[in-house]
Image (cartoon, rainbow, N blue to C red):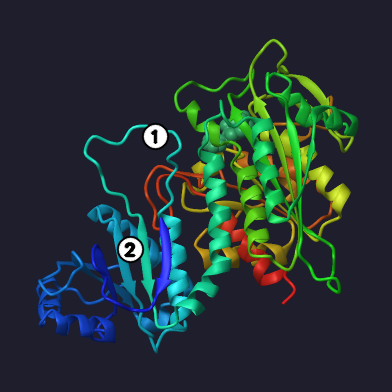
């Protein structure tokens, strides 16, 4: 979908959208429109019980005299609480509504809302951002037009008194949207197309944004002693990779110590020799979701030229059963020197992350590491698809993450990492085993495993297994890959780790 900003005018086709605050009468543009429609807008409002509640819609066929096809009133709710995230959500809802109406072009008028904490140009920019996020479509593999041509929303014009100001406020937001879309594209790709080498190739396109990208091959990883990651990869015909991305946007006089993000990139997880049941296994194409977020985040930071130094590291493997696959009971030596008894080859994400985390803190000594992984089915049992699990060894970082999540609507929930859980992965014949002894707290033992590879670095682990893929449309997300984490971590950086 194409989004443009312009001065208010009456569009010649499509939908004309105006905003209305809750129970405060029509805003100037809507009032003007109502006069042009000789009062029929107000009559329709009364007849339909439209009061301007946030997200409420009123659709009226445009009368003669207007060249648009339809007039849509949108409730923004109480103006005082109409902040940037409310504006984004509303933008998303507007696109949802337009899609269901089968409208291909629409224009939305924004008025100054005096009671709102936002200026008109920011309202316009955030509406555009939300609209754009909702409009995403992964259409690469559709070669035929549907029989009944369903019109797609192609163009949204946001009309505002100062379009150039709105446009410049939208620019960094558009950068973030690009990052989110990149993540969604990667997550949506099937595993026959997106295997480790190909995912590394896609990450290399970040060079165009000014990101430094290094790719470690299997040989290099063997030299570094990454036995945990390589053990997972050995059953696959696809070679593993590790990608190291650096965005250096901090000004010279600022602290150059980077922040770091690490992602699980299992391009397909069959479970290995501890093979998964076939039903639903196709979902495991998005077991590289953590890596997808890290790569999209690096794009977002670079696109909006974030004044920060940031490192992204992703471990890329395919987990397959084969004659060369690792067996349950195999013992591997990780880059840290710690040995691991692999009791379940389906608990592979932690093995990949063990080496990626160790490499990251060892090489970069970052201010913190946040890792993201579709790590456990157990987190879906705990939190469903609403929130991601947050495991953290640092109070400040945990508070910053919670706050960032609440702001952008990618919400987290704190999970425990007490020392008492740690003994569960102690092992008789190696330093640790890759699954817990009991049946409980599977997400926690997985996090405790990871913690053994970050020492005292401030660290947070986000288990995103429940939020990476959506089976239904959400306000800012069509069905499919969500990109959950990109906006959250972009916000974390913007609020706390950027030179003003
Ligand atoms: N990739 C899965 C976790 C997962 C499950 C992600 C469902 C998304 C949706 C992970 O590698 C895995 O298989 N975990 C096992 C761990 C167990 C063997 C200790 C699990 O959750 O069952
Ligand atoms: Mn697995
Ligand atoms: Zn997995």
Looking at the image, tell me whether mark 2 or mark 1 is earlier in sequence order: 2
* Residue located beneath label 1 in the image: 142
Q: Which mark lies nearer to you, 2 or 1?
A: 1
Q: Is residue 146 above or below residue 26?
A: above
Using the rendered image of the protein, determine whether residue 244 is visible from the camera's viewpoint.
yes
Q: Which mark is residue 366?
A: none
Q: Whole-percent x and y of residue 45? A: 15, 75
The quarter of the displayed image where residue 351 is located: top right
Q: Is mark 1 within 8 Å of ligand 1?
A: no
Identify the element where label 1 is drawn: loop
Foreground pick, 159 / 237: 159
Identify the element where label 2 is drawn: helix
Q: Whole-percent x and y of residue 293? A: 61, 49
Residue at 83 percent across and 50 percent down: it is 361
User: On the rendered structure, is 69 left or right of 112?
Assistant: left
Estimate how packed mark 1 is, as few (under 14), some (14 to 19) or many (20 or more) residues with alpha carbons within 10 Å. few
User: Which residue is outermost to the front?
Assistant: 12
Using the rendered image of the protein, determine whether residue 484 is visible from the camera's viewpoint.
no
Foreground pick, 389 / 160: 160
Q: Quadrant of ligand 3?
A: top right
Q: Which mark is residue 94?
A: 2
Estimate how packed mark 2 is, as few (under 14), some (14 to 19) or many (20 or more) residues with alpha carbons within 10 Å. many
Q: Is residue 489 above or below residue 468?
A: below
Residue at 67 percent across and 40 percent down: it is 264
User: On the rendered structure, is 438 left or right of 312?
Assistant: left
């Amino acid at each position: 979908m194409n989004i443009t900003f312009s001065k208010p005018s009456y569009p010649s086709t499509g939908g004309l959208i105006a905003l209305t605050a809750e129970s405060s009468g029509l805003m100037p543009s809507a009032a003007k429109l109502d006069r042009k429609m000789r009062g029929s807008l107000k009559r329709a409002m009364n007849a339909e019980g439209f009061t301007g509640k946030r997200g409420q819609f009123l659709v009226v066929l445009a009368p003669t005299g207007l060249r648009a096809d339809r007039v849509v009133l949108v409730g923004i709710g109480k103006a005082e609480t109409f902040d940037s995230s409310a504006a984004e959500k509303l933008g998303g809802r507007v696109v949802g509504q337009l899609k269901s109406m089968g409208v291909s072009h629409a224009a939305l008028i924004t008025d100054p809302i005096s009671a709102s904490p936002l200026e008109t140009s920011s309202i316009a920019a955030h509406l555009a951002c939300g609209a754009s996020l909702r409009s995403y479509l992964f259409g690469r593999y559709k070669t035929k037009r549907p029989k009944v041509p369903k019109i797609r929303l192609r163009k949204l014009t946001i009309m505002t008194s100062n379009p150039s100001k709105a446009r410049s406020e939208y620019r960094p937001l558009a950068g973030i949207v690009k990052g989110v879309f990149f993540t969604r594209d990667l997550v949506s790709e099937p595993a026959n197309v997106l295997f480790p080498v190909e995912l590394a190739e896609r990450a290399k396109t970040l060079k165009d944004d000014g990101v430094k990208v290094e790719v470690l091959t299997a040989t290099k990883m063997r030299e570094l002693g990454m036995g945990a990651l390589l053990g997972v990869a050995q059953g696959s015909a696809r070679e593993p990779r590790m990608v190291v991305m650096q965005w250096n946007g901090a000004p010279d006089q600022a602290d150059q110590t980077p922040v770091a993000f690490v992602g699980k990139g299992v391009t397909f997880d069959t479970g290995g020799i501890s093979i998964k049941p076939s039903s639903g296994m196709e979902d495991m194409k998005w077991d590289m979701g953590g890596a997808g977020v890290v790569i999209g985040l690096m794009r977002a930071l670079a696109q909006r030229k974030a004044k920060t130094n940031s490192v992204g590291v992703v471990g890329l493997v395919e987990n397959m059963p084969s004659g060369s696959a690792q067996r349950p009971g195999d013992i591997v030596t990780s880059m840290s020197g710690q040995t691991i008894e692999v009791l379940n080859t389906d608990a592979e994400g932690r093995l990949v992350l063990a080496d990626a985390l160790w490499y990251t803190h060892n090489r970069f000594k970052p201010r913190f590491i946040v890792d993201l992984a579709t790590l456990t089915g157990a987190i879906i049992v705990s939190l469903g698809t609403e929130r991601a699990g947050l495991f953290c060894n640092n109070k400040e970082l945990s508070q910053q993450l919670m706050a960032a999540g609440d702001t952008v609507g990618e919400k987290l929930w704190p999970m425990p990492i007490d020392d008492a859980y740690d003994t569960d992965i102690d092992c008789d014949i190696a330093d640790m085993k890759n699954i817990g002894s009991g049946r409980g707290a599977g997400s926690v033992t997985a996090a405790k495993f990871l913690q053994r590879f970050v020492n005292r670095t401030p660290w947070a682990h986000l288990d995103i297994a429940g939020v990476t893929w959506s089976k239904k449309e959400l306000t800012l997300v069509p069905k499919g890959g969500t990109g959950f984490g990109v906006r959250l971590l972009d916000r974390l950086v913007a609020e706390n780790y950027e030179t003003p």
